[in-house]
Amino acid sequence: MSNRADDDRPEVVPLGSGRYQLNDRGAHRLAYAVAARDTWVFLDGRVFVVPAAEGAARRATTDDDTALMAPMPATVVSIHASPGQNVARDEVLVTLEAMKMELPIKAPRAGRVTAVTCRQGELVQPGVRLMEIDYGS
Amino acid sequence: MFTRILIANRGEIAVRVIRACREMGIESVAVYSDADRTSLHTTLADRAVRIGPPAASESYLSIDAIVEAARESGAQAVHPGYGFLSENQDLASACDRAGLTFIGPPADVIAGMGSKIVARRLAKEAGVPVVPGETPADQSDASIAAAATTIGLPVLIKPSEGGGGIGMKEVRDGAQLSSAIAQARREALAAFGDGTLYVERLIEAPRHVEFQVLADHHGHVVHVFERECSIQRRHQKVIEETPSTALTPALRERMGAAAVAVARATGYRNAGTIEFLLDGSGDSAPFYFLEMNTRLQVEHPVTEQVVGVDLVRAQICIAAGEPLRWTQSDLRQRGHAIEARIYAEDPISHLPQAGPLLLYREPSMPGVRVDSGVREGADVGVHYDPLLAKLIAWGETRDAARRRALEALRNFPVLGIRTNIPMLVELLEHPRFIAGAIDTRFLDNEAAALAARLSMPPPSEVLAIAAVAQSTGGFAATRQSATRPDLDPWSSLRGVRV
């Protein structure tokens, strides 16, 4: 993860055990969040259910589970695998940056990369394919 | 005193009774269905007995299973909690036959108060007003109209055999009387095959104010003051408080005396609650007996906080034959308490919710009490009442209690299933609630406006928190990071800008 402290946008500090501190121009607020299939956030007595990402939701409705997709609007920072490469489960394959944070996109299962469908520096939308992976069967 | 008590219930009330037993040096025996094998009440009790499959009819509502569990576990008494079999005279009778003490009133009192007709008659005989109404012997239109005039407009004309609001006509204006009678008669005949009509005074926008009573086996009866329960949605209470903002000392004394009179007239024993409809406020405001609940109420903690009486302990002591520890003049109200019920329900659609409590953290702060039946990681099922917990805030004044309740709810994260906490926050901030200007129609009237305020999309800071939570792999990962600093991607960071 990268941290760019040179602006005054809100800062989110994970405190552990589902607690997050929101720092906004010197004011602190405590929030709670759990990322499950959706992400649940509790802030000041309000609860919000944020879909994991548009892309993740769309993936669930297609038969195509060979594609690795962008979970949110993001920029491709780096690509860590190339076609033909065998990858392990949870291996970081692509690093995205969104909202000033780097997001590692990991292999959901072990498999072999069959195609890389994104470019470094590209702005991707939720649900856009980043890589094709053959998981065998 | 008993040495072992069986609790014929589940959820927060079972936990409440288990805790009282433990404080009194009494062993507790929980009963559980297959759905509650690992529930809080099951694991907290000294012993636990399985009583059947998840369906309540085959477990928590099975008198045979409960009496058998009591016998098998060597319990001497059965506490029924509220709901389930708590107002079932057959459980009380079965306990008597099995040589068990039922912690509640005698079976015949439960039966009498369970009948609206008997309860109404007993209240009248005790000199306590009931909502004026009658079924005129002469059922001619003229006689019905005369009855309406005697009772005084506005009135409700309804089928004597009716129910569910069918054929029920509100009449505010004498000119509408004859057409309303004709229409109610037609609808009554069509729906129930019987055109007999009942005429009742219509109490518009009443308050629901109830009085707690305690009665021992030695002829002592006291009331433990009122609870205001007007914040309800379709007869399901949501927020309760004491004292009521509508009661003056003189009115409180009149209503308290009426409650004690009803309890005496029925030969009541143990803890019970007399419900009244209150029409207006002030010293001479009319009130009417509605019904008596022959059990502990969900909202009993507000009384405990304000009067300093442990009602569950009192129930157990009374059942053991001890005399009441207080006379009426010993009992005083001190400060104000508000209870908010936390339901597993969608705050907008009000549909019950089931699922895992991914995160559940009770607030801990001065003057705040949480009575809960669940813990983090539990699965909330569909089999039983959606009440998860009750949050009770005490303060020197009503506004102090309200602010504490609000602050506590803003620090009561429940994630994984929807709860009504966001709606409770809105309610406690509502100008009419703040002013105490509430009646039983308040929540139904305000439901749409409250829902609109709760429907707002997540603001940007919430999206930022969600993004960080997602990128850290969620709660499980942060928990791992906390215990494995070498794996913690955050350990080298002061924070993450988003």
Image (cartoon, coloured by chain):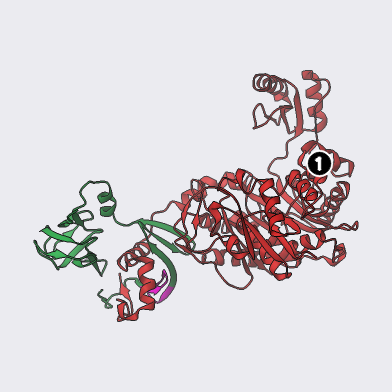
Residue A68 in magenta stretch = no
For the point 30% across and 69% down, the residue is B498
- Up the image or down, A113 lies above or below B94; here it is below
Would you say A14 lies left or right of B120 here? Answer: left
Q: Position of residue B205 (x, y in %)?
A: 68, 43
Which of A137/A124 is in front?
Answer: A137
Chain that appears green: A
Residue A15 in magenta stretch = yes
Q: Amino acid at mark 1?
A: Gly
Instruction: Quarter of the image for the N terminus of chain B: give it.
Output: bottom right
Which of A124/B354 is in front?
Answer: B354
Q: Position of residue B481 (x, y in %)?
A: 35, 75
Which of B302/B34 is in front?
Answer: B34
Task: Indicate the secondary structure of the residue bearing disc 1.
Answer: helix
On what subunit does the disc labeled 1 rest?
A: B
Q: Position of residue A133 (x, y in %)?
A: 16, 57
Q: Position of residue B336 (x, y in %)?
A: 70, 64
For the point 40% across and 65% down, the residue is A33
User: Which segment did they paint magenta?
Assistant: A13-28
Chain that appears red: B
- Up the image or down, A132 lies above or below B19; here it is above
- Up the image or down, B151 lies above or below B323; here it is above
Residue lying at the far right in this picture: please name it: B219
Indicate the quadrant where residue B181 lies.
top right
Label 1, on which residue?
B112
